[in-house]
Image: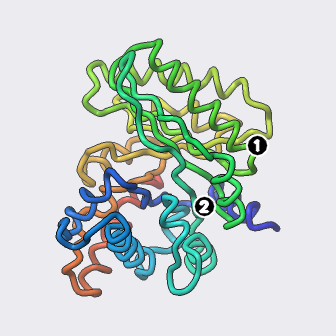
Amino acid sequence: MSTFDQQLAKIKNDKGFIAALDQSGGSTPKALKLYGVDETAWKDEKGMYDVVHAMRTRIITSPAFSGKRLIGAILFENTMDRDIEGKPTPTYLWEKKNVVPFLKVDKGLADEQDGVQLMKPIPGLDALLKKAKAKNVFGTKMRSVIKQADPHGIDKVVKQQFDLGKQILAAGLVPIIEPEVDIKTPNKDQAEELLKAAIVKELNALKPDQRVMLKLTIPSKDNLYADLIKHKNVLRVVALSGGYSRDEANKRLARQNGMTASFSRALAEGLKAQQSDKEFNASLDASVESIYRASIT
């Protein structure tokens, strides 16, 4: 079996969740602050990325982080291009940890229009996909945000996501399509109904061999996304924590049958640079276990 086929089987069949370790430029200082490291710890952008790579290395090399409870991890380009213990990060994840590597490919969000934030253009996407494929990265992730139950805006978000998704599929990678509904959206449940209808329309237009993943906000109406989970073109539906605390996100996720986690901030909640390895590993183990339990309902 090729590496891609082994990774595909793990994503499709294994129990577990995806760690989102993909904070990029804008969200990195905030993530580091929560980890107990403030902006005095670096002089420039390169220094900041060194510090965040040290944090991610500590998470990934921890005994608590393995393919027993995790099926994947989302990286951003700077992390993909770095090494962990002398191996490229994607190689280390797959060969040492049995965790499938994904790459965040979006370049952030455009200003809000029609109640949504589309993705900014992604220059050089084909070259980036080629590089990721050469490093045995399995798939990609890209995020847009929905802030109002505006049918026109939601259709635009979903169309942009699937258009880029097809470009990613053509490069031999599996896209995680992430149209996030902001948890503060007025009429969030209505926005989610509109989103689901728009996604179904796009899924039904895919060819049988075009398989995607979906990353969605935990819905207000339990099991709203059951049809998406069962759809023949969907490998897996994962949930973002969306600003909820880990306990709240886990509680809500556990009520969604077949939906698994892809948490970022909620996964790292409680981890501190100042902890001893024993404290750090125990804290991460408790976090991983709680998210794993919520993901296998």
Q: Which residue is mark 1?
A: 170
CA gap between label 1 and label 2 equals 25 Å
* Image quadrant in which you'd find residue 9: bottom right
Q: Nearer the viewer, residue 210 or 221?
A: 210
Labels 1, 2: front one? 1
* Image quadrant in which you'd find residue 35: bottom left
Q: Is residue 86 left or right of residue 274?
A: right
* Residue in the image at 21% along x and 73% along y: 41
Instruction: Residue 214: give x, y in percent of width and height.
Output: 55, 40
* Residue in the image at 49% along x and 60% along y: 75
* Image quadrant in which you'd find residue 63: bottom left
Instruction: Residue 123: give x, y in percent of width and height.
Output: 58, 42
Q: Nearer the viewer, residue 25 or 114?
A: 25
* Residue in the image at 32% along x and 50% along y: 26
Q: Which residue is mark 2?
A: 14
Quadrant in the picture for the N terminus: bottom right
| Residue type at numbered disc 1 | Ala
Instruction: Residue 235: give x, y in percent of width and height.
Output: 64, 45
Asked which secondary structure carries label 1, the reply is: helix
- Whether the residues at callouts 1 and 2 have beta carbons within 8 Å, the answer is no
> Does residue 71 sit above or below 231 in this rendering?
below
| Residue type at numbered disc 2 | Asp
**Furthest residue toward front:** 44
> Does residue 216 sit above or below 199 in this rendering?
below
- Residue 122, visible in the rendered structure: yes
